Image (cartoon, grey):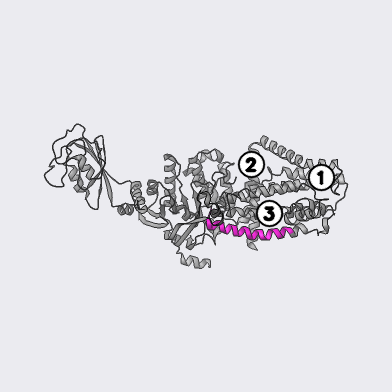
Amino acid sequence: MLKQDQIDICPRDSAVRIQHVTKTYEQWQRSNEGRNIIRNLIKPDKRIITALDDVSFEISRGEFAAYAGPNGAGKSTTMKLLSGMLLPNAGNITVLGMSPQKDRITLMNHLGVMFGNRTELWWDHPVIQSFEWKRVVWNIPKSSYNRMLDMVVELLDLQSILHTFVRELSLGQRMKADLALMLLHEPDLILLDEPTIGLDVLAKRQMIRFLKELNREKHTTILVTSHDMDDLEEMARRILMISSGQIAFDGTFEELRKSAGSLCRIEVTLDSGESAGSGVGSGVDSASAAGVDADVSCGARAVSGAGTAAGALSRESGAGAPVIPQAKLLSSTDNVCEYEFDQAVTPITSVLSEISRINGVIDVEIRKTPIEEVITELYIKWRGV
Amino acid sequence: MADNRMNLKRLIGLYALYGKMDLARFLKDTKYALLGILADTISNLAAVGGVFLLAWKFDGVGGMSKYEVLFMLGYCTLVTGLFTTFCASENVGHISRRIGRGQLDHMMIQPLPLPVQLMAEGFIPFSGSSNVWSGGAVLLFSIHMMGIVLPWWWVFSLVLNLFITLTIILSQSYLYSSAAFYAPVAAEEISSIVIDMQGNLSQYPLSGMPLGLQVSLLGIFPTGLLAWFPTLALLGKLPLHLPYLFPAIMAVVIFIPTQFIFRKGLKHYVETGSNRYMSQGFRR
């Protein structure tokens, strides 16, 4: 296919286009039984693993997209396909209007690839030597190299390690140096596979801030994978989720939360001095009915208006937590009770109104369900557990 | 044509880069680097010394004089030195290690043709050339002791023979290394096994050996082409009535299928991927 044709197929505003891509692997299977020795020799068992199953998606230029999924879902396979390290069994891949296989050399001048568990740095040389190596191998003009070097050194705070041997760097320093190395040729598209793996909080924050700035100011397209969903949510606007080799979700993080049921958390702190009064129902029973273990330890509460209507706020008759209709009690320790409710079903005003009727409430905190838990729910659902 | 000129220009630039990097590594701790070079030189001279002492004791081997044997050992050391200088670093000469360890991925993301990368990355002119100097010295000493006068163009003949010998070694290394595409665990070290075995065998003169053995070691497992045949060719004593360019013909015969088989293996690699990646200092 001519290059012009490829550019026509892949519009200029598209950085990545994957169309009906399938990638399978063979996995050797072997039993340890002696009677199977001959069979293992002559006709070994092989299992076909479908890493990507007819996957299609597109990333526009300038986008910052997250690519997530459970272990073995096909994330790294996708990254390798996009960077030309692997060939698909079927389908088309276009990166920046080029084929990663046919136009590998041209594409690599515009693409930056970083795998968190790999390094491109030269182990027995100072960091600056790897940067110099990159300049020569990528044939980067001196002026452009110096400009980018100044930028990455400043933004990633690399000055103190420029002359340190790579072998002697900490993991966080090494990752920052690897990121800087990847950026020296000013790639239009960056593929990051687990870039924050093993980093401490500070190093992670620095890297995330830098990537966001790069995307915002230079309009560099970034596709990033990570198991840390909080990191991804902080970095990216769009999330593609892959499960069992198929795109299971493609949208914003907000939409992802909604797909899991617009769940919201509310934490109610009660005054420890409040004593139990009379009320309807057992808190323990109610909590159990709400799907919570019966070992909750919130103190007994008097609830105004309790028992006046079915479904109204009930009160503990002994050790237990107040029951809020349509809210699931998640935990209850040291006078702090945490509930979860679906905003799509129950308006927040109605939950707050119910809480206002509880005696001894000293604090209420509302927050979205952590994205990690939304994802966990989704993974469990996808696996059919 | 323009592409080739560009690649050549890039290649020269890369040689300069890797030469500079080698010098920097060499100068990191010069004391230990010099000690390393000295140890390397002594061990190589000791290795060839054994064969030379035998030749000295018996006043030659199978029709070769003791100084002709010494010439052969000098040639052999020179070849080892050139292999080390151009190919030993970063496992370029022992490519089965890179294949077996799944490290070819790193080459895919460089904007250079793979042959250009392979030709340049192994270049270590400072830390790897000790055998070139010691081999050259042994070669000159043996020529001096033989008392022969060589024409000026003989140097080109030597360079041509060295190039052909290196082509044969590398072709074999890459041919056997192709097995690592299909059996990365079993074949990870195959290249070093093949090259080391051939290196050891090539130090023994085949003169006076049974004809069948000579033919086998020239045609089937061509150890005789690594030092013995070139030595006799350079001294004007072609063995077995074979043509002067016999090693060149053999080099082509090995190189062509190697290129085909290696490319096929590489295709298999990008189709199946590697699950044996060894991280941290991937060029080791």
Question: Is residue B120 visible in the rendered structure shown here?
Answer: yes
Quickly name the residue at label 3.
B172
> What amino acid type should be assigned to the residue bearing mark 2?
Ala
- The residue range painted magenta reads B250-275
Q: Nearer the viewer, residue B30 or A239?
A: A239
Quick one: which residue is furthest to the top in this view?
A: A273
Which numbered tag is attached to residue B261? none
Dot placed on the residue nearer the N-terminal end, 1 or 3: 1
Q: CA distance from mark 1 to mark 3?
A: 26 Å
The Cα–Cα distance between marks 3 and 2, rounded to whole angstroms, is 32 Å
Q: Is residue A209 left or right of residue B135?
A: left
Q: Nearer the viewer, mark 1 or mark 3?
A: 3
On the image, the x and y values in percent for residue A301 come to 17, 37
Q: Is residue A12 left or right of residue B91?
A: left
Q: Where is residue A328 drawn, in percent x and y?
A: 24, 45
Residue that label 1 marks: B70
Q: CA distance from mark 2 to mark 1?
A: 35 Å
Quickly name the residue at label 2. Answer: B24
Residues A86 and B2: in front is: A86
How many residues crowd around disc 2 within 10 Å: few (fewer than 14), some, or many (20 or more)? some
Q: Using the rendered image, report if marks 2 and 1 lie on a common chain.
A: yes
Q: Chain of mark 3?
A: B
Q: Earlier in the sequence, mark 2 or mark 1?
A: 2
Q: Residue furthest left?
A: A308
Task: Sort mark 1 into few (<14), some (14-19) or many (20+) by Cα contacts within 10 Å.
Answer: many
Image quadrant in which you'd find residue A16: bottom left
In the rendered image, residue B246, in percent from the top left (x then y), is placed at: 77, 59
Disc 1: host chain: B
Identify the amino acid type marked 1: Leu
Disc 3 crowd, CA 10 A, few/some/many (<14, 14-19, 20+): many
Which x, y percent locates residue B124? Answer: 67, 46
* Lateral position of residue B193 relative to residue A318, left or right: right
